[in-house]
Amino acid sequence: MDPEKLPQQPAASLPARHARTKQALLVVAALVLAAIHSARLCFNTSTTATLVQPGGGIWWSQCPDDSTTYCGFLNVPRDYTDPKADDLVSLALRMIPATVPPKERLGYLFTNPGGPGGSGTLAILHFGTILSRIVSGRYNIISWDPRSVNLTSPGLECFASEGDANRFQRDVEHAGLSYEALGSSALASSRNASLAAGLSWTRRIDAFSRALDSACDTPANQAILRSSSTAFTARDMKRIMEALGEETLTYWGFSYGTILGATFSAMFPELVGRVVLDGVSDSQTYTNDLLEWGRSGMHDTRKVIEGFFSSCAESGPRGCAFAPRDNSTGEALEKRYDALLERLRDEPMPVGASAVGPGVLTASDVQYTMFHSLYAPKTWPHLAQLLADTERGNGSDLFAAANSAALSPSRTPSSVKHWPFRRPSGGFSSSTAAIMCSDTDPAALRNSTVRGVWDYMNELARTTRSPTADIWTIWITQCRHWSAKALEVYRGPWTVADGLKKTNYPIVFFSLDADPVTPLSAAVKMQQGFGNSSSTLVTQSGFGHCSLAHPSLCTAKTIRSYFLDGTVPALGTHCDADDGFLFPHPGNDSATAAAGGTLSKEDAELRSAMWELSESVHAVGMGPRR
């Protein structure tokens, strides 16, 4: 981007938030930005980094924490149902400028990393430059912190510090999963005893949901709690577009970002430009029945678990440390995994030293680590090594991986000068609840009982045969006790038959055929709901969450062509995953695949970008995160 070709806007256009909503950290960050702005206007006007659109209301400057990106703020009404000039939300934005000459630029590509509760400003740091490479540098890549997230103000203050938020999340995990709650296999048990143990565990988990609501449901938080729905965030996107002078939305949304993208497309169909929804979640059940949404979300989880073990066995010991010999089978490896869980359930492993200090490795630690690894096949070789080490009696690294929150900041807020664009308090769990629990119809959850929650978890467990059922149940049922009521929600229509209007341009839904939390069936349902005149569907073989988890040159070329040329892929287009990505080792051509082999230079560079993007999958997604 050439800053000299853009008009300057005075520092007075910095966000002027209402006094009661000012956050000390944000004020200091703004002062840092103002200082940068003033210094450059006075001393180096030929190279100033201040970037604004005429009349847009966004003041841009190089970000204090990364000078390759640009940060800014935009004031929007806190309450779109009753807007007032002195009742505002200040959206924190971050942008990576296009790299091509001005005449080749195509505008702004919006992105959302998922969650709900993911920080867009931090996601841009993780993978914004890679997205730019995928679209040949022809877009300004932009994202923002949605309401209740990170530096968008007023902030949601459920915890006094980031350390407190992380400790709360660790306490939830340290409560264990139901596998441990049911007791050691060495103990005599009965149906009644198992039920009693299960209900006791459920009550303990349910108490954490009550505690989270109590922590967040304070007078100071009420305004933002009532204003954090996806419907309001969709309206924020529209305001950002208008500020940037964009006539239609160009967007790449991941996971929960597909719910946001679908909501925007349903509310403002006339503003839909080139929109990719990747890792598609079922918006209809998400907004109307969260329990049913949980059921549908687990449809392909078992495929991913089996994919880990079968791919490990196929790779053999050269690529997978958990495969002791070349003739292993996936079924045999999973039996060893189950035996390891049983051993740790019966006798947890003491850990004298690890990267997070001493402790005790439990079966639940292993299950949580497995769950998080399902999102990203790139992590599977490391997971296999952790399992192999633990099986041999060394659980130090697995314990550290399972307790990585211990490496997070202490209870003392971080110095502003080190993280001027990252709020040092809050927590992903509270941001998630503020958005998700606002969006969904609470009736089904509130009518459930502790016994009903236990039965629901077991229902999911029978489907997935994995700890995902426990973890997903814990995540969903945090909305059982949520008190805040959103000022506006969008819960439909979600189908043409029910009144959904035709979009200005066709949406492209992308889905892997084995995604642990957003199954292919959800993408099929959403595409059918929007209809063939408003959307199409591309499927890809592979494991993990969203297309970026298991890279495919075919997918990358399809996405690039859509964003650059407007080429809409035919309904039913299918792409295969690249060879050599799972458990790479000498002999499986992974090195050749990563380098592009005999591909053209353009395709080799595109494939390289997609492989790099797969390493950033931890920055996107749906569900509990560390």
Image (cartoon, rainbow, N blue to C red):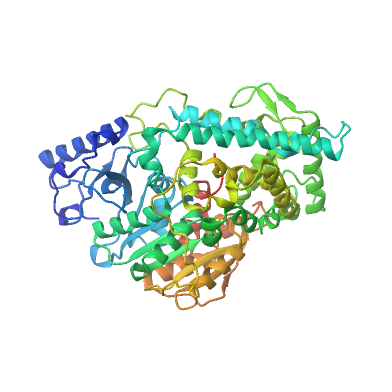
Q: Quadrant of residue 423?
A: top left
Disc tally is 0
**Residue 517 visible in the shown view:** no
Can you give x and y, in whole percent of width and height, for residue 21 in the image? 29, 36
The quarter of the rendered structure image containing the C terminus is: top right
Can you give x and y, in whole percent of width and height, for residue 494 in the image? 49, 67
- Identify which residue, 200 or 139, lies in the foreground: 200
- Above or below 421: residue 80: below
**Residue 343 visible in the shown view:** yes
Residue occupying the far left of the picture: 42
The quarter of the rendered structure image containing the N terminus is: bottom left
> What residue do we see at 20% from left, 51% from top?
57
Locate residue 416 relative to residue 7 in the image: left or right.
Answer: right
- Identify which residue, 533 or 381, lies in the foreground: 533
Q: Quadrant of residue 20?
A: top left
- Above or below 155: residue 283: below
Can you give x and y, in whole percent of width and height, for residue 267 in the image? 38, 64
Locate residue 186 relative to residue 370 in the image: left or right.
Answer: right
> What residue do we see at 30% from left, 54% from top?
97
Can you give x and y, in whole percent of width and height, for residue 274 in the image? 39, 68
- Identify which residue, 503 or 617, lies in the foreground: 503
Q: Quadrant of residue 263?
A: bottom left
- Identify which residue, 584 or 291, lies in the foreground: 291
